[in-house]
Image (spheres, rainbow, N blue to C red):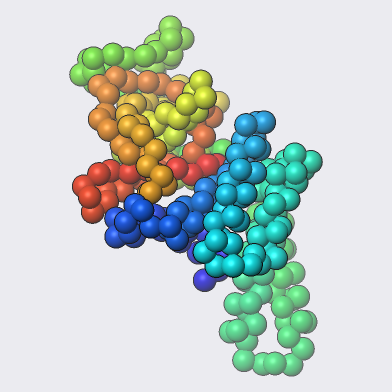
Amino acid sequence: MSAREMWTFIHFLPLMIGDLIPRSNIPWKLVCLLIQIVDMVLLPEYNSEHIDNPKTLIKEHNALYMKLYGDLKPKHHFLVHYPSLIRKCGPPKFIWSFRFEAKHQSSKAYSSNTTSRINIPYTLSVKAGLKFSKFLMDFKKGLDAEYTLENETFLDTNELTNFSQVFLNPSQKDHLITAKIAKSGTYHGKKYKSNLYLAASENKSKKLYKIVYIVKLNKNSLHILTHEIELKRFDNHFQSFEIGRCFNALYLKPIEDFSSPPLNLYTANNGKVYLRNKYL
């Protein structure tokens, strides 16, 4: 598997097999600790509390690993230095080589598909040059739009009467009459659709919202009309939030207020619905 495939696999592994593993299983506890470390290390920003958390998790993970499997590997030792690295350099996500390694994939594909083995570096450099030339030609046309909406329409304000509460400030109420709405669109390269979910951090607690509409209040202002969804608790065994009921209230929030890309909910074999959170 590629690095991205392994990352996706470990992210969804608790939901894939968690219901098949007893909650008292010690090796699974080790896996859950590793997943927590991965999630913490890949956060887009940190405060002092966040930096201390991986330090504790790494210590607990390494102790349990030695108890189960004996000596640590060199990479387990590298983990110990991650908290101090984060303090000095910030989130590792912004200094990693992930995107540079992904750039190699096109060259690997070209070399595999080229039947000639004469001067492969020259062949690959020509292809890379042509690809970069195409990029420069496209760049003259300007950057892609920050966002695009599909099948824009005007909001029928009568829809708002179906909800027990609608949380809008006076400015939003005035603009909502002339606002354009859509059920799907793209923002910063990510696809947003009705009935997907967005997470937000408010007052040091996690909140979950369900997308109703994507709303363009004006040319430079993109908002999300949402329901709030109840987060019952965080289930360590599934490394996921257990989902509760949907509140019959509407919120209009700037798209920048959300800390996650659009998410899906997953129903486990135990009948409960879970959310595995991601960060932008």
How many marks overall? 0
The residue located at (65%, 82%) in the rendering is 111
> On screen, 216 above or below 51?
above
Q: x%, y% of residue 113?
A: 58, 84
Task: Give percent across and percent down for residue 133.
Answer: 72, 63
**Residue at the extreme top of the image, as rendered:** 170
Q: Is residue 155 in sight in this rendering? A: yes
Where does the image place residue 40, in percent across and percent down from the top left?
Answer: 58, 44
Camera-side residue of 34 and 224: 34
Quarter the C terminus occupies: top right
Does residue 37 lie above or below 90 as drawn? below
Taking depth in this image into account, of 97 and 195 the one nearest to the observer is 97
**Camera-nearest residue between 227 and 30:** 30
Of 7 and 65, which appears nearest the observer?
65
In the figure, 166 relative to 17: above or below?
above
Q: Residue 194 in the image: x percent, y percent?
A: 33, 38
Q: Which residue is drawn at 55% across and 61% down?
A: 67
Which quadrant of the figure has residue 236?
A: top left
Q: In the picture shown, does residue 185 fall above or below 9?
A: above
Residue that protrudes farthest toward the front in the picture: 67
| In the displayed structure image, the side of residue 26 where residue 137 appears, left or right | right
Name the residue at 28% across, 43% down.
273
Question: In the displayed structure, does residue 103 sit left or right of residue 159?
Answer: right
